[in-house]
Amino acid sequence: MDNTRRFGRLIEGSSPSRGTMKKIFAILILISLLFPLTSFAGTYQANGTDVEYKGLIPCGQKVCINGNYNENGVCSVIEKEFPCQFCHFFVMLDGIIDFVLFKLIPPVAVLMLVIGGAMFIIARLAEPETLIPGGGDPKLLSQGKRIMTSVFIGLLIIFSGWIFINWFFSLIGLSDFSIQAGLGPGEWNKIECSIELPE
């Protein structure tokens, strides 16, 4: 049985199990998914006019036309009911992708780096009788390193995916197709879809 003395207390089991870490991570993801959606806002163009919306869905609700929402959620110019059109689906997908990549992943990555760093430091500060030559609690130390390494590898995969996909599409000639469709080179990811302003 593995008993470790930490901070003056005898603790059975020297590090949290993988199942515990998975539960903590799942709870953090759920919390971070729930509360930012109330403050999520995006913009798009309709007939050359800027439209700003609140929440995840860009239509079927009142939106701010030719203005923006202040910190109290009040539109600075015109607020109008905007019915859903087919192109709003693409606006919503773009908003979800931007939200996940630039508003959700960075804070979760920082949080996981802090957790891994704290585990690393706590493992190094283990009491002298539990120290092995050159280090502290080996299980907690390796788990902290594994978390930090996983975060860096995950960020590398997520953000280098765009570069790889762009390279692959230009290799197979999809960027040439986007030029023929009236888009610029390398604009394979743009969808030309017009949204009409409501009367």
Image: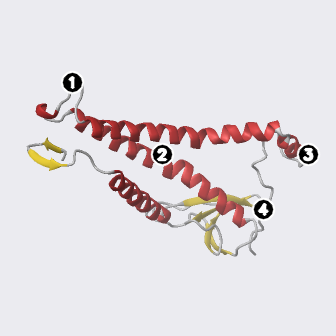
Q: Mark 4 points at which residue?
A: 47
Measured in 3D between alpha carbons, the distance from the residue under mark 3 to the one under mark 1, in whole angstroms, is 66 Å
Residue at the front extreme of this rendering? 1
Visible residue check, residue 51? no
Q: Name the residue under label 3.
A: 180
Measured in 3D between alpha carbons, the distance from the residue under mark 3 to the one under mark 2, in whole angstroms, is 36 Å
Measured in 3D between alpha carbons, the distance from the residue under mark 4 to the one under mark 2, in whole angstroms, is 34 Å
**Mark 4 touching mark 2, by CB under 8 A?**
no
Report the amino acid beneath label 3.
Answer: Gln
Measured in 3D between alpha carbons, the distance from the residue under mark 1 to the one under mark 2, in whole angstroms, is 36 Å
Mark with earlier residue (4, 1):
4
- Residue 129, compared with residue 116, is above or below; it is above
Secondary element type, mark 3: helix
Q: Name the residue under label 1.
A: 133
Measuring from the top left, give residue 70's x and y in whole percent.
50, 60
Q: Name the residue under label 2.
A: 106
| Residue appearing at x 60%, y 58% in the figure | 96
> Callout 4: few (<14), some (14-19), or many (20+) C-alpha neighbours within 10 Å?
few
